[in-house]
Every structure is written in C-alpha cells, then in structure tokens.
Amino acid sequence: MSKYAAPLTDMRFALYDVLGADALFARLPGGDAATRDVVDAVLDEAARFAQTVLAPLNQAGDAEGCHFADGVVTTPKGFKEAYAQFVDGGWAALNAPEQYGGQHMPETLGAPIKEMLDSANLSWANFPLLSHGASEALKQHGEEWQREVFLKPIVSGRWTGTMCLTEPHCGTDLGLLKTKAEPAADGTVRITGTKIFITAGEHDLTENIVHLVLARLPDAPAGTKGISLFIVPKFKVSRDGVMGDRNALACGSIEHKMGIKASATCVMNFDGAEGYLIGQPNKGLNAMFTMMNTARIAVGYQGLALTERAYQNSLAYARDRLQMRALTGPKRPDKPADPLIVHPDIRRMLLTQKAFAEGGRVLGYYAATLVDVIERSEDAAERRKADELLGFITPIVKALLTEAAQETTYCAVQIFGGHGYIAEWGMEQFARDARITTIYEGTTQIQALDLLGRKIMQLQGAGLRHFVEEISGFCHAQQANANVIEFIKPLAELTQEWIGLTQEIGKKAMGNADEMGAAAVDYLFYAGYISLAYFWARSVVAADASAHPAEFKDSKRLTARFFYSRILPRTRGHLAAIRAGADSLMAMPDALFG
Amino acid sequence: MSKYAAPLTDMRFALYDVLGADALFARLPGGDAATRDVVDAVLDEAARFAQTVLAPLNQAGDAEGCHFADGVVTTPKGFKEAYAQFVDGGWAALNAPEQYGGQHMPETLGAPIKEMLDSANLSWANFPLLSHGASEALKQHGEEWQREVFLKPIVSGRWTGTMCLTEPHCGTDLGLLKTKAEPAADGTVRITGTKIFITAGEHDLTENIVHLVLARLPDAPAGTKGISLFIVPKFKVSRDGVMGDRNALACGSIEHKMGIKASATCVMNFDGAEGYLIGQPNKGLNAMFTMMNTARIAVGYQGLALTERAYQNSLAYARDRLQMRALTGPKRPDKPADPLIVHPDIRRMLLTQKAFAEGGRVLGYYAATLVDVIERSEDAAERRKADELLGFITPIVKALLTEAAQETTYCAVQIFGGHGYIAEWGMEQFARDARITTIYEGTTQIQALDLLGRKIMQLQGAGLRHFVEEISGFCHAQQANANVIEFIKPLAELTQEWIGLTQEIGKKAMGNADEMGAAAVDYLFYAGYISLAYFWARSVVAADASAHPAEFKDSKRLTARFFYSRILPRTRGHLAAIRAGADSLMAMPDALFG
C-alpha cells in the first residue's frame, strides 16, 4: 500500500518564501481574504481530506475501475461518498466568483490543493477537474441566464462539467470535427454526433452533468473557423433552471485504459440532444482556447503530484529495504545489509525525483500567480505582461512536469526493483497513471509547437522576453551574493545561450517551417531545464533568507547543486540535436522508413 | 489489434552483411550444418510460427492473464497448443548439443529466433526462455546422470526449467538468502523455503517442471560463499529417470503485475522438497553466474523485440492517421489532412525507434557471435578474447536495449496519442511489458556496476580494450572511405574520449569507491551510445558493400546520420554528469532527503 503525506512545508515554502504569494494576495483586489492564516488553515484541511479520504481509495479504485452497463457508469466503491464530502467541504466552490456561490480564493491557493488531490487519487480528481474547464467557459462566454442556470450548480459541486472535443477521426486536429448542431424553433439546438475520450462524460456522483460540446452549425465554414460551442446537459434544463427529462445523449462505452482506471473515459453519443449555443457562433474554438491554459497547467500539476508521491514512496523504501553493502564498506554493520539509500545510483534517482518535485512545484505555482494577476490586477500593463508570461510558461509547465513524471515514476519502479512491477506495492500504478499526462490536453509535441511556433515565433516572443528579463534581473541582483554564485554564473550564461539559440532557430525557420517543427521538442526540454534552473536558484536564495532551519536550507542547496551538475547538462544534448536541423528528420523519404 | 511481421531482411542483413555470421559458422567446428540455405529456411519457419501462432495470442493473453487456483496455474487460451507446436517443431532443441537430443545450431541463429518469439508474444516466450538457463546449468555443472534424466526432457521441450533465486527479503543481494537444504540418508536433499518472482514456476504446458534452486546446506558459510544449487523437480524423478509422486513444493500464488500478464510469476513454497545437489557444494552462485550472461543477453533481446514491434505499429499508424497539415503546406491536398508522418517530431520518434531497432539488432547479435566463438572455437586465445568481450558487452546489451525499449514504447504510445493509452490498440501493452526488462536478470543499476565496477575496474578492462581496438581498427580501415568519413571522424574522437574518461573515473575511484558507483549508470549509457554508433557506422559500410538495393543503402545511411546527429549528442549530458563526481550524489545527508 503506497503512502501519501501532503508536503505542506515545501508547499508553503514555494508559496510564501519563493513566490511571495501572501504579499501578492494582499495587494490584489479581493485577495485580502486570503491571509496567511486562512491559507494555512485551508491547506491543512485539504491535506486532511486528501490523505484520509482520497488516498485510501486510490489503489482499490485502480483495481476495481469504473463499471459500465446499459449506458450507466458506476464509479468504484467510496468515490461517491468522497465526492459528497468534497462538495460538503465547499472545495468545488473555492476559486469561483462569489456571485455564483464561490469563495473567490486565489488560483494560487488552488494550485497546492489541486496537487494534493492529484497526489492522493488522480483518477478521482479528474471528476471535479473537468468542472473547472466548464466553469471557465460559462464564466467567460456564457449569457447571464446560462451562468445562473448552469454555472451555479457546477460551482456548488451539485453538477459536474465536461469538455467534449475529440471525435474518432480527430484529436489534435479539431478542424476535422463533424458533430452537427441544428437550430430548433424554440431557440435551442439539436446536437448529433459522437465524441470520444470524454473524461467524466457519465458517472454516478451527481444528479446532472453539463457537457460543453464543440459542433458545427449548418452552413458553418469548413475547418476550425466553423466550430461553435454548446451547452448540452445530461438532463434537460429550462432557461429558468428547472431540470426536466433525460436528454437525447448517452454514454456508449468506457475505454479500457493503461491507467487512471477509476476515471471514466467515455464515448458519448449525441442523438439530437437539446443544447444552447454559448458565446458567438463559429467562435467555439476561441472559447475553448481560453480554457486551455488552465486545463494544461492543471495537467502539469498532475505530473507534479505523481512525482511527489513517487518520491515519498521511493524514499521510504530506499531507507527501509536492506540490500547489499555500500561500496565504501558497511554503513549499518548491525544489519544484514545496508539500506538502499547508501547506493549512489539510488541516490541519483531519489535526487532526480526530489529536484523535479520541489523545482517543479515552484514552476507550477508560479504559473498560478500569473493567473491571479491576470484575473485581479487593476493595472492593465501588469495584466498584459502576466498574460504573455502565462502563455509562454504554460506549455513548459504542462510538458516538462508531465515528462518529468514519466522519469520519476520510472525511478520509483526501478528503486522498488521487482516489487515495483507488482500491483500491490503501488509504484506501477503511478507509472501507468502518469502515462496519460503527456497526451491529454495536448501532447508534448503540441505543447512544443505551441511554445516555439506560436508563443515565440508568431507572437514575437513577448513572453520569453519577459521571462528572460526576469531571470537576468534575478542574476543581476544576486551577482554579489557569494552563497549562490555557483548557480548564478551558469544560469546567466545559459540564459544568454537560450536567447541566441532562439534567434538562430527563428532565422532558419523563416526559410523552412520544418526547422521550427524539428527543433520544437528538444527546444521545449532545453527551455524547461533552464526554467527549472532559474527556480532552483531562486529557491536557494529564498531558503537562505527564510526562517527555515539550517537543514532545510542545506537540503535546498544540495538539491540545487545536484540539479545543476547532473540534470542541467542534458541541455547539451538537446542543443546539439536542435542544431542538427530539420534535415536530420526530413531527409529520409517516407518510403524508406521500412 | 497490433501488427507484427518478422523483419527478416534486416535480420539477414545484420547476420550476414554486418556480422559475417555465415562465414563464422562455416569455420567453427560443428557449424558447417548451418549453411545460409539452412539458416534462411529456419528463419522463415520461425517467422511463420511467430506471426501466425504466437502473435495472435499476445493481446488476448494480456487481457486474460494467467489463472491461479489451489496451487494450479492455467495459462491463457491457446498458450498450451502453441507450446505443443513449438515442441513439435523442434524449436526447444535448436541450440542444445546433439548428445542430449539437440540440433546444436549456433547461438547466433538462436538470436533472431528469440527476437521473433519475443516480438510476437513476450509473455509466452518467457515459458521456454527459462528452460534455457536450466539447460545451461545442467550442461555445464550437472553429473552425467543428471543430464540424462533432466536435461534431455528439457531439450526436447517435454519439461521446462526455472531459476529459483529471489526470496522476499533478497533480490539483488543473494547473500541474504535463507532457503535450506538438508541432506537425507538416500543422498538427496530436502529443500525448505520460499522463493518469489519465479517465472514459469508453475503452469499447465508440460508434465513436469525442473526447478534450479539456490539454497544453503547445513553449516554453510554465511553470505554468498555458502550458497549451493539444487535440482528440485515438480514431480519426483529417480536417478534412472522414472517420474514419481508430486514433490513437496507448490505455487502459493501468482503476482498481479504491470505487464507480461500472461507470464506466470510465481511464489514457490518448498516444504522439504526432494532435490539433488548440482555442481560443488557452496559454489552455487558461480554456477548461477555462468548462466547469467546468456540470460541477460536474452532479456536484452526482449527489449530489442519490443522496440521492433513498437516501431512497426508506430510507422503504420503514422502513415495511416490523418491529422493536421504539414508545417510547409499540405502534402496530401486530396485528403482532409496530412498523415502524421509529415510532422517533424513524429519522424524524430519514428527514427529513434528505427535507430534503436536496427542498431540494437547488430549489437545484440554481435554478442551471440561471441557466444559461438566461446563455445566452438578451437583457438584458446580466440575463445578467451571472445569471453572477455562478451563479459564486457553483456551489461551494455542488457541495459541499453531494455532502456531503449522504455523510450521506443513511450514513442509508440505518444505517436498513437489518446489511442496509445487504450488497451484495444496494443501500444500500452508494449510499454507495460517493456517495463520489466530493465529490472529482471539484474536492474540497469546492477548492469552498470557490472560493467564499470567488475568488467572494467576489477578485470582491468580487458573486454573494453578489445572492443576499443576493434573500433579503432575499423576506423583505421575506413579512414580513406569518403562515403563514411562523416561517421568515422566523430566515432574515432569519441572512442579516444571514452578511453580517457574511463581512466579518469578509474583514478578517482581508487580513492573513493563511490566515484565508481556515482558514474556507473551515466557511464553505461555513454558507452552504450558509442557502441551503437560503432555498429551504425559498420552497418553503413556493410550496406554499401552489399547487394541490397539503393533504397536500402540510403535508409541505413540516413538512419545512421539521424543517430549521430540527434541521439549520440546525449553523450554530452552523460559526460558532464559523470564528471560531476560522487559529491553530487553523496553530499546530501540521508536525513535531508525529506
């Protein structure tokens, strides 16, 4: 049975000491309710819920999975009760605006809570997660009556939401979608089509489910410019909020997946289902994109959450399991063998996990602070800058933290040896659960194209410029700090190299767009590792300046040193791969692949 | 449903054109029966068996798994019939000596056959695989009557064998094992203890199972010097070969694993079971080690096999699935979107798979040629050199090909996108099956310590010296060949760097053994990538000199170019990580990990 204890000390360190979230909340309109006392109390309570209610259901939920029969999805034992507690505790309403029944707490507070739920039980956490996207769409694009009727029950948690995008023949390429919306005489529309991979498309946790569905109106232009967004509830709801008959939609089956087996991944068949247009006709994709940053960051947190839990269990096992003697002679002569943690490569794997967990936490929460600035700041210039930064950092948060989770859960299985491969010990579940995170909400490939192609090349790199300025400012401010010069010097050099490399790719890509595509994934890792190096240097500075004990400060410094000396050099391989250019990938004629 | 077609053309290219296996067979005693005609016919027949009998059982076997009830293990539907065909076809006897009923074909011919079985159905292939280890132990350490009684039925395939090493408290650290062997008055012993992770420990494929069990005789020295090896059959067998009653041993349960679900991984309880000592008392570990090179190379082939199958399916999907337009404009304007293969990063993943499959094939088969030289050459110096080379290359074959399988099956899931995560498409099974290969028969960590600590440092690097001389000789011979100078130059430079790096680590490790342990895994990858670079350069030379069509030669050259420009630079990151030294891992006090 795998363990989980919320890393509250490190979460608070990331929030307060590194990112100054308490000061940020205090100065943002409506943020003054989120005092440090309140935030601490909320975190404690979330930890209790995650540890005692959700974590114990994780392994059993994986073993049981969701059940499907005759269109009905039954969640594993305990899921429904846990969801009821979640709603009773007011968790669903934490970040939503007060006018719709929410508590309007900052998104930055939502980040560690999200992390805890995901660490405790990723499959379960996917049920409320999808409501967040639906909430955002309703909040930003819904008419007032739509918010009253649909947003309020979602905010309270009485209903959940979905995002119905993918169809059998189109995942990434939404321009190909075929689902139809026929206007009816009463002002509603009739939706017909099949959607796949719909997380929480059907379940037994709530009395209604609000589907947000992408579909085409009659005579809509072809491709992505002819897609509209619709609200399609499982049970029909009138404009005055009265719930009526079952709508003409049904779950056709659930997928048998590698992991997140307790999360219902549904095929949804819409058969003339009654719905309402939300936002402008043919602007559905724009509405979807506004939700996407948040959803992508949320998946990044899933990666972080699995890394954290993999680390906790790996560390406990490495301390407990006795196997072989240390290379330098017995460390525990009183025992039949030394604990695994004496072995250098076990430590390399543990430090890899720790570096990605703690560094990734700062990176992930940093993105949330930008969301709060965008949503709350009264300074338009500050909002705009935060928006550009968020657009830039989002694909890095999403892809780097989920790719890191592949590596850290690999390490967990490896540290447990044969036991890592056995279900009962729990490590292989983390690896299976993690595997979806580099795929859904846009694959790593899509994140890389979004970063390099869109955020840097199309948008002239405003976000990158801000971020590089921020790093340079930090390096400048710390250049006389002898305690961190070991980090500042390589960080400043790498940042310069990064700027140069970006220009280099930009020039090549002007002549050949494949140069961008061929560089994109290596560039994402390259940029991601440098970003983590920045947050690790900040963490050391913040730890030194904090009231934490000396051991805490040493732990941060030594982990940062590990990151700089053993992870950051991976940028050398990525740099060389990028410089190899598009020819290395495009020269092979398709027929010669095999 | 995933596909598999044995890559016979590339297998023959690796065997004949690159490695000159036909010439080797012709000059080795007893190898002249393995003419090219015979080898080709055997490969064709193995391909037919793998494709038509085993491959169709792979996905269903994974879904069904092995069944366990009251000590009885039932294999999935079709497994028993497939095993009967395997025995009828004479496959079990292919490599064994003629005096025990075998066909004594070269090990190098066994390599592609093993690859095909593993590609087709890894779980199934694990049942006959373990017989190979038992055969080797009996062949090399058994008394004549033991070979008559136990080896012959294993060679024929009527019985299978196991290797019973691991106990609940000891996997890698066999010195800790507790299973007891009590001599009985009749010259047999009584074995008592519990063994775990016993592949094919119990099943319904054969009438008897021969367990080779590590245990301690009374008054045996503590640790690894007090371990003996015993033959313990499921049904008792007398010295004259008569099968008797059920022995006092039973399967207590089977493990629920991440993958290879149709392979029975058993807890075996020995309760005073009757057995026979094999080899010298207290020398059991030595006997085990003689089997280990072969078993480790065999697991390396499992990695290769999954890489090959992952590649075939990824390529087919990338050609078939239409999604988005090429960055440089539509390539198939007649279709609603372009096939995935137009996208640079999809090609990067496909080429990664292809480079590891084809390069890994040459590396893997190269090891098999060494086994044949060791077993058959009449030249003692040649045998000794091959033995040193084999000892050196074995951990690279095992670890690099299995780690590559993690990456290539990751790529397969990623290329399939959401469908990669769904059982029905088959990619996620490859990823789950692959995950055990970096663990069993010694984790990657153990391989790395074996390579750097034992094969290089303890044995003064004889194997490395031979290998580096071989590469240097190749580079020297090709230095005037303008067609391959693009590969020869970096290969020669890297080889020099490799020698220097090895000396550098050696010096540091003399003062501190942790320096070896801290470098080992990065060193293994570093050495592995350079080894593959060597085999890729050889492949280009061999292709150019062959009668293959121009397209084949171009395909080899372009894949080699991809490997050199986009995979080989990973050595830069590993080099820097190695040079960071032990401090980067050991400086953190255990208490500060968290």
Image: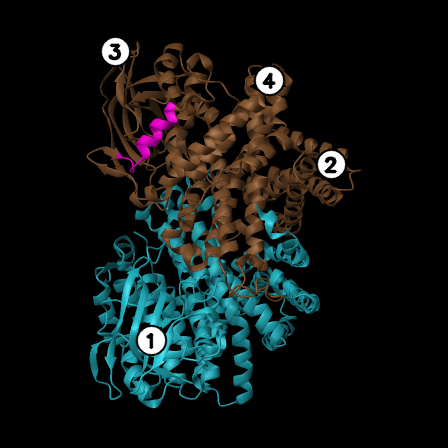
Chain colours: A brown, B cyan
Specify which label sits upstream in the sequence, 4 or 2. 4
Specify which label sits upstream in the sequence, 2 or 3. 3
Q: Secondary structure at mark 2?
A: helix
Q: Which residues are magenta?
A: A74-88
Q: Is residue A213 visible from the viewing direction of this image? A: no
Q: Indicate the amino acid at tag 3.
A: Ala
| Disc number lying in front (1 or 2) | 1
Q: Quadrant of residue B261?
A: bottom left
In the rendering, at what x and y percent does residue A83 appear?
Answer: 35, 29
What's the residue at 60%, 34% (across, down)? A13
| Disc number lying in front (4 or 3) | 4
| Disc number lying in front (4 or 1) | 1
Q: Chain of mark 2?
A: A
Q: Residues within 10 Å of mark 3 (few under 14, many from 20)?
A: few
List the residue tagged with mark 3. A185
Q: Residues within 10 Å of mark 4 (few under 14, many from 20)?
A: some
> Decide: marks 4, 1 in contact (CB < 8 A)?
no
List the residue tagged with mark 1. B191
Q: Secondary structure at mark 4?
A: loop
Alpha carbons under labels 4 and 3: distance apart: 46 Å
> Decide: marks 1, 2 in contact (CB < 8 A)?
no
Alpha carbons under labels 3 and 1: distance apart: 83 Å
